[in-house]
């Protein structure tokens, strides 16, 4: 091989090496810390919190009792804290003892869709898990320190970005409990047909999606 050919080969190697270095600098790896304060959820939460604080001295004029005002204030402050401190995408953990429906998207590359998560599993943080699907007939506690309710229609409970949400079954009562109060509760009639009508028996027949836990 001639000296000129050796020089050309060396230059090609150097060029490829430089390209790799540039890609590493520009492209953030999937495990890099996330900043959820630049998203739509943070804008929505901060606007709602600012509006609520404007009526803190006269909450009844906004339709709140003092107790309801304090509850809503604590809810929004908790959501704001999650958005400001979360370092990875929202994840859903299933500790119900049965398969559960979750709404998730592949790292924001796809729209949120209904998937199925096996018991004992947690969605991978390459995915963005928006929340859980709860069928009619479920007995649930949607937030700590709230009473049990039996659902008369299916709902989807959604959380803000970065939330580490857990749905678990109380071993004594058999009630499904959530560790964090949802940011939104959507009913079938409010979702333009996006919420299907599935029973728990229907969900039990579904094959859990393995891609959620890769």
Image (cartoon, helix red, strand yellow):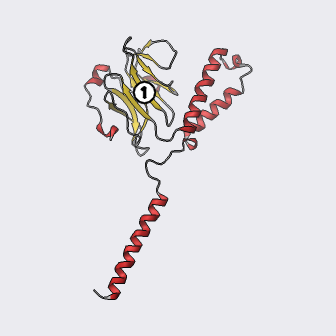
Location of residue 21 by image quarter: bottom left
The C terminus: image quadrant: top left
- Judge left or right: residue 158 versus residue 61: left
Q: Residue at x 71, y 23 (%)?
A: 56
Q: How many marks can you see?
A: 1
Report x, y in % for residue 29: 44, 52
Task: Label 1: state its secondary structure.
Answer: strand
Report x, y in % for residue 9: 34, 79
Q: Residue at x 44, y 61 (%)?
A: 23
Name the one closer to the observer, 71 or 2: 2
Name the one closer to the observer, 186 or 172: 172
Location of residue 111 by image quarter: top left
User: Which residue is the site of mark 1?
Assistant: 166
Report x, y in % for residue 203: 30, 24
Report x, y in % for residue 142: 47, 20
Location of residue 134 by image quarter: top left
Q: Residue at x 32, y 31 (%)?
A: 116
101 shown above or below 110:
above
122 shown above or below 62:
below
Q: Residue at x 41, y 46 (%)?
A: 109
Name the one closer to the observer, 89 or 150: 89
The N terminus: image quadrant: bottom left
78 shown above or below 175:
below
């Amino acid at each position: 091989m001639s000296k000129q050919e050796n020089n050309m080969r060396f230059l090609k190697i150097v060029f490829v090496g430089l390209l790799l270095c540039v890609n590493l600098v520009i492209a953030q790896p999937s495990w890099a810390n996330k900043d959820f304060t630049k998203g739509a959820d943070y804008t929505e939460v901060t606007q709602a919190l600012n509006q609520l604080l404007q009526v803190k001295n006269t909450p009844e004029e906004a339709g709140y009792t003092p107790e309801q005002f304090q509850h809503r204030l604590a809810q929004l402050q908790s959501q704001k804290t999650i958005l400001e401190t979360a370092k990875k995408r929202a994840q859903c953990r299933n500790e119900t003892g049965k398969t559960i429906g979750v709404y998730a998207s592949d790292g924001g590359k796809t729209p949120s869709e209904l998937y199925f998560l096996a018991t004992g599993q947690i969605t991978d943080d390459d995915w963005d898990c928006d929340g859980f699907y709860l069928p009619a007939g479920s007995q649930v506690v949607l937030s700590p320190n709230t009473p049990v309710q039996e659902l008369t229609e299916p709902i989807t409970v959604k959380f803000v970005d970065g939330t580490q949400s857990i749905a678990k079954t109380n071993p004594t009562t058999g009630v499904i409990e959530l560790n964090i109060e949802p940011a939104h509760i959507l009913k079938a009639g409010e979702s333009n047909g996006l919420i299907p009508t599935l029973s728990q028996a229907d969900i039990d027949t579904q094959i859990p999606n393995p891609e959620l836990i890769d």
